[in-house]
Amino acid sequence: MQLPVLMIRKSDVGPWLATLIAKAEVIAPERGLCGEVTFSKIHSPEQVLWDFENPLWPPKQFVLPQTDPIVRIQRSGDGIEIAPIYDDRRRILFNVRPCDAKGIAFLTRMHEADPPDASYLRRAANLTVISLACNKPCPLGFCICSDSGPFLNGGQDIQLTDLGEKYLVEIGSEKGEAAVADAMHLFGAVSEDEKAQRKVLESEARQRFGEQTCHFGSAMRRISTRRVDDALWERMSDWCLGCGGCNFICPTCYCFSVKDRGGDGAWTRCRTWDSCQYAAFTLEASGHNPRAERRERMKRRFFHKVSAQYYVRDGMTGCVGCGRCIKVCLGATDMPAVVAAIRQRAWHEH
Amino acid sequence: MSTDVFLPQIARIEAVRDETPDTKTFALRFPAPQDSAAFRFHPGQFVELSVFGCGEAPFCIASSPTRPRTFETTIRRTGTLTDALHRLGPGEEVGIRGPFGNGFDVEAARGRDLLFVAGGIGLPPLRSLIWNVLDERESFQNVTILYGARTPVDLVYKDELKSWAATVGVDFHVTVDNATPGWTGSVGMVPVLFTKTTLRPETTLAYVCGPPIMIKFVVQDLFMRGFRDESVVSTLERMMQCGIGKCNHCAIGHRYVCRDGPVFNFKQIRELVE
């Protein structure tokens, strides 16, 4: 089925957003108290930023919260009662970048896999993602290397493209159709010229990537076939502080732990983000730790993200090229740096 | 099983037996008949056991599916959750998710000679298969059980060890690393027992379970004695939190010990790439 491509004048976006806010929780980039940009729930269309630096925290927290209550456990009389906790709130992610939209698609595909994870999937089923294509790549982004931007070409609910006076509205799913249904009078037909303009903008954006690249191909071959020397992992791991920051800001990282919180006969079982870079991640009660060394943990992270084995399973690399790990890493072991070192078989001290 | 993968079923502790000063065997049963009927397992599979308020952790099923009235799990007290579990007694409730994992391939073992080599707390997962084999004794050829622990007090299932020693058609030997007064049996690590029995590498499936260092020495010895990678089977231990291949704690390469394992033969173990 050919899904519609429409356009909306910039002055009409506010009224459209108002219809969205009326029926769902709308999460969009907004300016925080200290000037930082964050994804947060907005109450009026004016809060939404249109020209912004991508927030350091990706929007994954709205499908996979850092602390996610999944089971309610209650002592009652002499027995225990257990019930699942679901979050069925309707949410719209508005003005997220293609890399983050792709990150959520990655997470959803992973959670759909056998056995399906109901707690995640119910949240994802109520989520509509409206993304804003990047006419200008961000300084640290390398989405072009992982096929996650600067424009989406399929898989989106809705993708907006800034055409100057108006936005092109590419609808890619039923959820996308539902998001415009209540405001159809604000949308107009799109001309062939405007469709052509979008193609030009995409091609121009693709030419405008700077120095930041990440050539996954040869790194993938070497990682998948165990042809990266332990000595190289060892040298690189000297530059990793093991803080786990790269995991937490990564749009595709989803490793978790399960903990019970509460007391006095009433507990909430929570899933919480965990990091494969922590020594305790694999520590067993016996004291045995299969990944006691930092180099082993680093190797694990990049195997999961870049190996062909996972590429086959997940249909894409576990990296959307958003560049957040470059920004957050206190050492220098971000994705492009490690991929380059594996490709060149040498680590350049920074 | 519930449709929600994270929702435990309530199970009741039927009996608790002390095995060693820090290890107990818990016999569990589902009070809800539908849960009980739905709980079918293979030897070598594990469950995620919840002590409510403490969380959950993976434990192997130590009893045989041929004795389905209850199922048992043998647990050493070694942390917060197991500490709390050790304080629970008959009648109290725990949560169970599972069974998870592939388990031992019992069908492939029929008609073969079987060698069980266990170290310390590594006996419980093998015990599930051992009782399965002994309950269907006529389907299997020679059965040899070799078991070692640090000291005599660390041996689990002491009564059952005596009964295996007395069973006709079971070649059973036990050793301890350090003898204590009154111990008259073998002393030394498990491989010392290989000299006490007849090994038949061509026809035997060997099941090895114990601490990593014990597994290492035992399998080295078995390969030197002519066993092939495919016929040496072990069950790997990892921190399996979700049991369904999602949380990534137990991943080795793109394989998940909780789903692809925990039972692997050594050919498969060598193929675990990371």
Image: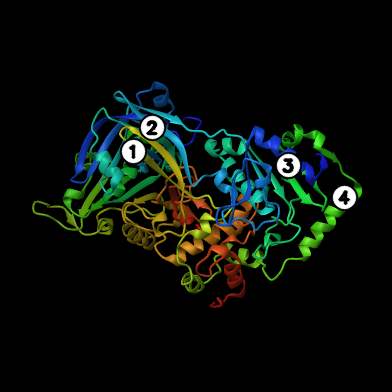
Chain where mark 3 sits: A
Whether callout 3 and callout 2 share a subunit is answered yes
In the rendering, at what x and y percent does residue A39 appear? 60, 49
Secondary structure under tag 4 reads: helix
The answer to whether residue A113 is above or below residue A139 is above
Residue annotated with mark 3: A14
Residue A144 lies left or right of residue A308; in this view the side is right
- What number of labels is visible? 4
Residue annotated with mark 2: A73
Q: Which mark is residue A194?
A: 4
Question: Between A82 and B105, which is closer to the camera in this rendering?
Answer: A82
Lower position in the chain sequence, tag 3 or tag 2: 3
Question: Between B14 and A98, which is closer to the camera in this rendering?
Answer: A98
In the rendering, at what x and y percent does residue B152 appear? 17, 50
- The residue depicted at 66 percent of the width and 54 percent of the height is A99
Residue annotated with mark 1: B53
Which amino acid lies under the numbered mark 1 shown in the image of this protein? Answer: Gly
Secondary structure under tag 3 reads: helix
